[in-house]
Amino acid sequence: MTSAVLAAPAVAAAAEPVLLSGATPRISGAVGTSFDVALSVTNAGGTPVTGVGVLLHTDWAFEPTEQFSNCDYRPDARARLCTFDQTLEPGKSYRLVLPYKVRSDTYAPGGAYGQFEWRAADTITHNSGDTPGTGGLLQLVQGDPLSGHEEGSFATTDLTVTGTNRPDLVAIGDEVSGAVGDLVEATVGLRNDGPAALDHSRSGEAAAEVEVTLPAGTSFVSAPGCHEAEEASHYLCGVGKSYLYLFTAGTTATWTFTLKVDKVVADAQGTVQVNPPCQCNRPADRDRSNDTTLLTVNPSTGSADQIAPVIAGTGLLAGKSAPADLVFYPAAADNVGVTELRATVNGTVEATCTLTGGCTVSLASLPTNTVATVTVYAADAAGNHTEKSARVRVDNVPPSATLSPAPGSSVPSGPVKITLTGVAADVWYIDAVEGDFRTGVSRDPWAYTWNAVAGATSPRFVLRDLAGNTTTLETGYTVTVDDQAPVIEQVDFVGAYSTNRLDTGAGWVGAVSTLKPTIHDDSAIVRTEWAVDGVVRSSAQTFSWDARTLTASTATVRLQVWDAAGNTSSKSFLVNVDKTGPAMVIAPGHNTLIRGTSYVTSVKAADPRGVATTNLAGRNGSATSV
């Protein structure tokens, strides 16, 4: 005896609660300026959420100006976590304001970053080293969601720091003595004389580093925290993990080098150089004259200065490309002090050099893709001098690109995607600049989305190639003012097997349904809000509606949308809710006696809304649908 069972389509399980986060997207200010970061959280799920918290992943520049009793603070006084013992109702949004100021030792000009992550209370862990604040409660109150609330539980704030505030990194050398075969220990390093700190905690890269060149007659034994560089007898030491990638003013980082004296050389001089040249972004140093110092083995005691300065490096990477406007920082040191620094290109073109600011020279008159020799000359007060040269390849062709929309175009208000094409392969990065705000442009393809609103600063793009040539492209866009409200043409139920229009009052939905609007507007729609029977249920552009909790057979849906120009419109309509599955009749009936080796089963399904699909589970043989 065989049996046949009709399987109706499975009903989707209830969605888990989802927390959507929003934040003030951009802030600009000088060192010491106070600013507020507004955060929002939306319960986009179908059930209340009791107890939430927000993790504050902020860079060093974000200095809290208040201590809240429901927030945890790290030993360095940075806020890490705030918790709230309250219930977030489904579909509702809540807001808070965090007061900060730009920390006084923040590097400028530059940028910092804050990331804010909302979590349910049962997923939050308090760090044992943190302490609660000593002030009042930070309030989380009902309010409108902020931008970014459709991106998930994380929201970000970009802080642009204006003005000038830089560190002075000072190299630390040493003098040691020893006989042949002795092991000697030299302590070298660097110090940040401020006023700015260097914060690389987000990138995880060394905040600063030194390159140590060993003195003649010595060999390397050990130097914990350092590693051998590409060039022989050169070692790199970085201010990294042990300093939490944060190098504040007044901090000193040192490393101990154990060297073996293989040969006694009087006044054998090695060097300690801060931040040697690289194909990377180095922080600006307000005084370059103290970036290089000596590591001396077996110094002499004579009164006359007969020792020439040491040039640790020309400040150029040999064999690499050099731009039309070349800026470089020779690294020179002397036992008494370097008093003069000069440089020439091919022996004829004079560079402009200072001890504190390095050298600048124009290569625009030289043919591109040719080799040039840069010679650096350093002298001390006694007239002792030395020279060192590096050969570089001239690349004085600036980068270029084509903008779309074309510069000077009129663009509609709202998000405008700007693409850059024809960008050379050697372009290293492109920055988009809007007033004080500067941000990197994504590549492959190079594209940037600009929020075009009336009165906004049209962006410009700064291209930089590997040689260091830069080009600035101005867009000069004008924004077309949009004063017309969006038009909600219709709202449809979109299912796997059928669709029907809902905003006429005669439409219907199933237990779990997707509602999709058709909207026309000259600007982009930037905010959407769906409410059911007066309760906000979603802020997504399409609404996944779980109607199984409704007891009534109808519900009133309200859709409100806002465009980028701030215009809004809404539409309310009655929706019929169908939560009853199809009626099914199976023949032969239940417990009917079947004789023989085969039989025919018939299934009839009916539903006022129509039957989407039927399926016989566990059947053998063929099946025919009529």
Image (spheres, rainbow, N blue to C red):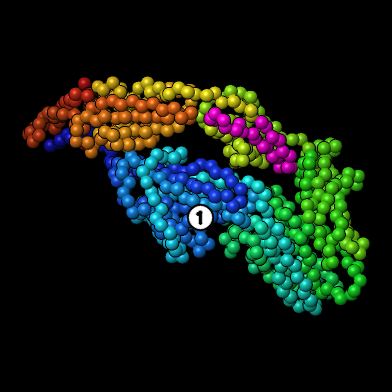
Residue 167 spot, x, y in % from top left: 68, 56
Measuring 64% from the left and 34% from the top, which residue is drawn there?
A: 460
Identify which residue is drawn at 43% across, 57% down: 68
Question: Who is closer to the viewer here, 416 or 584?
Answer: 416
Q: Is residue 142 left or right of residue 431?
A: left
Q: Quadrant of the C terminus?
A: top left
Q: Amino acid at mark 1?
A: Thr
Foreground residue among 575 and 585: 575
Query: Would residue 219 appear left or right of 563 to someone viewing this image?
Result: right
Question: Are there few (<14), some (14-19), or many (20+) residues within 10 Å of tag 1?
Answer: some
- Tell me what residue is drawn at x 28 percent, y 34 percent: 534
Where's residue 45, x and y in %? 33, 42
Q: Is residue 464 left or right of residue 45?
A: right
Q: Secondary structure at mark 1?
A: loop
Magenta stretch containing residue 466, yes or no?
yes
What is the span of residues highlighted in magenta in the rendered image? Answer: 452-474
Determine which quarter of the picture holds residue 370. top right
Q: Quadrant of the N terminus?
A: top left
Whole-percent x and y of residue 160?
A: 59, 45
* Residue 212 is inside the magenta segment: no
Tell me if residue 485 comes above or below residue 60 in the rendering.
above
Identify the residue under disc 1. Answer: 65
